[in-house]
Image (spheres, rainbow, N blue to C red):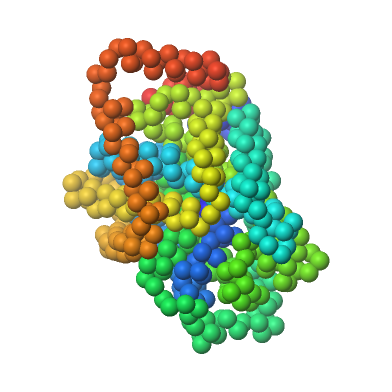
Amino acid sequence: MAVGIYFLSDTIIKELHSSPSVNSSCLFVVISPGNIIGSGIFVSPKGVLENCSSVGLALIVWTLTGVITAISALCYAELGVTIPKSGGDYSYVKDIFGGLAGFLRLWIAVLVIYPTNQAVIALTFANYALQPLFPSCFPPERALGLLAAVCLLLLTWINCFSVRWATRVQDVFTTGKLLALCLIIIMGVVQICKGHFYWLEPEHAFHPLQPYDMGRIALAFLQGSFAYAGWNFLNYVTEELIDPYRNLPRAIFISIPLVTFVYVFANIAYVTAMSPQELMASNAVAVTFGEKLLGVMSWIMPISVALSTFGGVNGSLFTSSRLFFAGAREGHLPRLLAMIHVNRCTPIPALLFTCISTLLMLCTSDIYTLINYVGFINYLFYGVTVAGQIVLRIKEPDLHRPIKVSLAWPVIFLIFWAFLLIFSLYSEPVVCCIGLAIMLSGVPVYLFGVYWENKPKSFNSFVAKLTHLGQKLFMVVYPAEVIHGYSFIS
């Protein structure tokens, strides 16, 4: 999972414009593989291997997931410059398929995707932080949930208190994932040079540990895709990108191949030190890897990964408010959720809402079920968005498209998408159906809250009083239309 996209959010414009080093006429986005590489690579390898049944197939799944990610990113790049609105696939689905489809994307993102992603990262942090204290067994579930909740509450407070503190936490803790991954890959290369590549030889790599199953292979792709999540985050800030016609494709062609290389080689490194059985028996793969190879220095690995995942929770909280702004601008979310503190410029209501919904997700400590849950819903809307690209080509063939990709790419993605959803539903019907049910529960909410415009005055007055109460409680206001020449939400 992406642990932090480095962009300048609406919530920090005031603070940034007070700095003489920032040009008030533009916003900068750092385009880097750091937007994608996150905690997923430390938790997904176990889930991918369990569902693939062999090392060789697992490496193929990691590679193909990178290829599919690149294809979907190309499709999103065309949509991003054709519909240059911040908000990502929410904005595209809404403009192409209408308000209800866009609202359902927003609904599921607010209630499921962001909270589940943050819960997984927080649980991964807890796993790696506690694993050294329980070397011969798994940490207790209650301890995992409690530490994950403490991590989430602390970082929510930091993000509510100061944007600068939040960005500093992100900068400091990003080094954790880089250190851990560099160590893993370097040690893997050393292992291969020493001749420890038994599980990479074809006759052993493709030896199935259990019979192959198409449904489980589909779940392996969902587990792998969790590690690649973040590839579409630049589409959430298209309006703030400098020269998106050049920078969006550049981000894709540089970042995704590099991330795929890192992920494949990290997994190769894992199996040079561990057997598949040992890898699948570990809840903290990088810790087990460190214990095998680093000896007395093995403490470096859990600390590095814990730092990475702690920063990951912070990054997810830091970026989630962008979707709230986009939704509120279109009238699909209560105005209170898009408001910021009058002095600190932090989106306190949005952060508290995300924190509470994430705490509810922590009721289960089964990370891999949560990943399947969020992966299925994510891919459902990825497919809807890419299908929208084809629909837009048919409905408006003459629309100006600064980036125009071959229609073969969305077709290839949709074929893969259909395979993934059908077999995931077959393999995990309960998890997938719960996600679908939550999504469809947004239909009556949309009809009542958005579609029904002529509500009774008493109801509107009640909502206004609640909003006013929230404003006084959190000391927040709706962002001004223009601050220092930058247009916020109209």
Q: Is residue 111 above or below residue 372?
A: above
Residue 362's quadrant in the figure? top right
Horizontal and vertical percent position of residue 434: 37, 48
Residue 106 falls left or right of residue 194: left
Horizontal and vertical percent position of residue 158: 64, 34
Residue beneath the point at 62% across and 51% down:
141
Residue 397 falls left or right of residue 115: left
For the question of whether residue 252 can be seen, the reply is: no
Residue that protrudes farthest toward the right in the picture: 296
For the question of whether residue 357 can be seen, the reply is: yes
Q: Please count the marks in the image.
A: 0
Residue beneath the point at 61% across and 82% down:
197
> Viewer-proximal residue, 145 or 387?
145
Residue beneath the point at 46% across and 72% down:
52
> Viewer-proximal residue, 305 or 181?
305
Q: Is residue 15 above or below residue 411?
A: above
Residue that protrudes farthest toward the bottom in the picture: 203
Residue beneath the point at 28% across and 41% down:
101
Q: Is residue 415 above or below residue 480?
A: below
Residue 258 falls left or right of residue 397: right
Instruction: Report the quarter where the C terminus lies.
Output: top left
Horizontal and vertical percent position of residue 407: 26, 59
Q: Is residue 234 above or below residue 185?
A: above
Residue 311 falls left or right of residue 231: right
Horizontal and vertical percent position of residue 78: 34, 51
